[in-house]
């Protein structure tokens, strides 16, 4: 097998098993339930990563990662915001790791929050932050080019007086299961990722339902742009980013 060893910004490790399986889509071409395929892949991965796993060890680890690979994924885009073509697909756990780790967006997040002029800050953000389309994977960032909905939606809250208190409130809402919640790049807002089921209702209907529920029960207004399935969500640094504990098991 031939591999592209180009670094991506948020790989857990250059040659970890997760990257091997997800980036090269190994499981689209091989069936680890077939011993010959399992043996071939074990040998190939050991050569690729300079490891020495047995077939049993490789099989056990792949089964764990398969559960992750079946979780919702969405498109990741390189800056600037004018870019409409995705760089790759990522999972919620990967988004969590890159938001939490300051080495990725720590410096640029601090720079943005030190800009006092709103127009200058808006321009800086649009040119210096990568972003994701949380609600799905796309061939191009346009609603018509949606490949698959992730059954996730990001709700934006701007200009919140008490960030930590509001974050605790949102995470504690039992009617809506929080998948992730983090402080927005500006530092004065929140991005709240929740689950939807597009088999039951459309993206827009779910958004209107959330909008009514949050206004009525908590007097919280969400950015109306969230109704767009291709809504861009800028990635920044938040050391206290919350992710649903089920993803960390």
Image (spheres, helix red, strand yellow):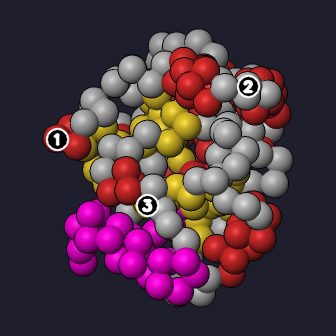
Q: Which residue is mark 3?
A: 152
Judging by the rendered image, the residue that carries numbered circle 1 is: 144
Comparing 69 with 54, the one in front is 69
Residue 94, percent from left and from top: 63, 44
Per the image, is 211 magenta? Answer: yes
Whether 72 is drawn above or below 121: the answer is: below
Given contact means CB atoms under 8 Å apart, are the residues at marks 3 and 1 in contact? Answer: no
The magenta stretch is 193-219
Which label sits in the foreground, 3 or 2?
2
Image position of 42 (left or right of 233): right
In this orientation, which residue lies closer to the viewer: 56 or 235?
235
Q: Let me know if residue 239 is in the magenta part.
A: no
Above or below for 28 versus 225: above
Query: Label 3 vs label 2: CA separation?
Result: 31 Å
Residue 54 visible in rendering: no
Q: Secondary structure at mark 3?
A: strand
Q: Rounded to the nearest whole Å, what is the CA distance between mark 3 and mark 1? A: 18 Å
Residue 90 appears at what percent x and percent y? Answer: 51, 41
């Amino acid at each position: 097998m031939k591999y592209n060893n180009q670094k991506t910004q948020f790989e857990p490790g250059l040659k970890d098993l997760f990257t091997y399986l997800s980036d090269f889509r190994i499981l689209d071409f091989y069936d680890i339930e077939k011993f010959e395929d399992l043996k071939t892949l074990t040998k190939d991965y050991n050569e690729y990563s300079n490891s020495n796993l047995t077939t049993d060890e490789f099989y056990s680890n792949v089964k764990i990662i398969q559960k992750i690979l079946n979780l919702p994924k969405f498109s990741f885009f390189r800056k600037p915001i004018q870019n409409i073509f995705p760089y790759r697909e990522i999972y919620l756990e990967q988004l969590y790791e890159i938001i939490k780790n300051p080495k990725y967006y720590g410096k640029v997040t601090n720079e943005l929050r030190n800009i006092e002029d709103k127009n200058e800050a808006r321009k800086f953000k649009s040119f210096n932050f990568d972003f994701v389309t949380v609600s799905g994977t796309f061939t191009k960032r346009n609603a018509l080019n949606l490949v698959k909905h992730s059954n996730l939606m990001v709700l934006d809250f701007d200009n919140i007086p008490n960030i930590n208190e509001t974050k605790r409130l949102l995470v504690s809402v039992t009617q809506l299961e929080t998948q992730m919640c983090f402080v927005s790049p500006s530092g004065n807002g929140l991005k709240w990722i929740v689950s939807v089921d597009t088999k039951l209702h459309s993206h827009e209907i779910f958004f209107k339902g959330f909008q009514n529920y949050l206004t009525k029960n908590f007097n919280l207004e969400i950015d109306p742009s969230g109704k767009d399935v291709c809504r861009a969500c800028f990635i920044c640094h938040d050391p206290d980013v919350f992710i649903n504990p089920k993803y960390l098991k």
